[in-house]
Amino acid sequence: MIDTLMTALGLVLIIEGVAPALFPNKWRAYVLKIAAQPVAEIRNIGILILAIGTIVLWLSQ
């Protein structure tokens, strides 16, 4: 089980690192745009991403 979690964590870090590594200027502009959003909207996006991730994990079993 720990191997699966470490693999998942590694994949998340790789995926998260692609955008700033390949497109640093666009990534910076995107982060600044997100930072300007209201907290409630950021929270809703986070909840949506969590829900999608949960559904994907549930369907993959």
Image (spheres, rainbow, N blue to C red):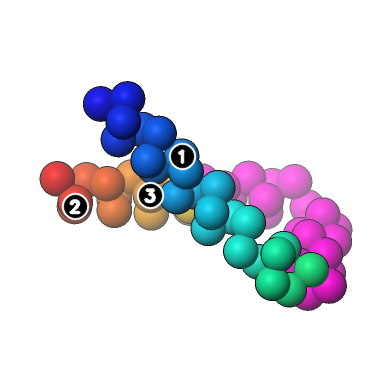
Where does label 2 land, which residue? 59
- Report which quarter residue 54 is drawn in: top left
- Report which quarter residue 22 is drawn in: bottom right
Q: Tell which residue pokes out farthest to the top in this image.
A: 2
Q: Nearer the viewer, mark 1 or mark 2?
A: 1
Compute the Cα span from label 1 to label 2. Answer: 19 Å
The mark found on residue 53 in the picture is: 3
Q: Residue at x 70, y 64 (%)?
A: 21
Left or right, 43 with respect to 54, comes to right
Compute the Cα span from label 3 to label 1. Answer: 14 Å
Whether residue 26 appears in magenta in the rendering, the answer is yes
The mark found on residue 46 in the picture is: none
The percent position of residue 51, horizontal first and vertical second, equals 40, 48
The crowd level at tag 1 (other Cα within 10 Å; few <14, some 14-19, many 20+) is few
The percent position of residue 45, horizontal first and vertical second, equals 58, 54
Q: Amino acid at mark 3?
A: Gly
The answer to whether residue 47 is seen in the rendering is yes
Asked if the residues shown at circle 3 and circle 1 are in contact, with their CB atoms under 8 angstroms apart, the answer is no
Look at the image and give the residue range highlighted in magenta: 25-47
User: Who comes first in sequence, dot 1 or dot 2?
Assistant: 1
Left or right, 33 with respect to 5, comes to right
Q: Residue at x 19, y 52 (%)?
A: 59
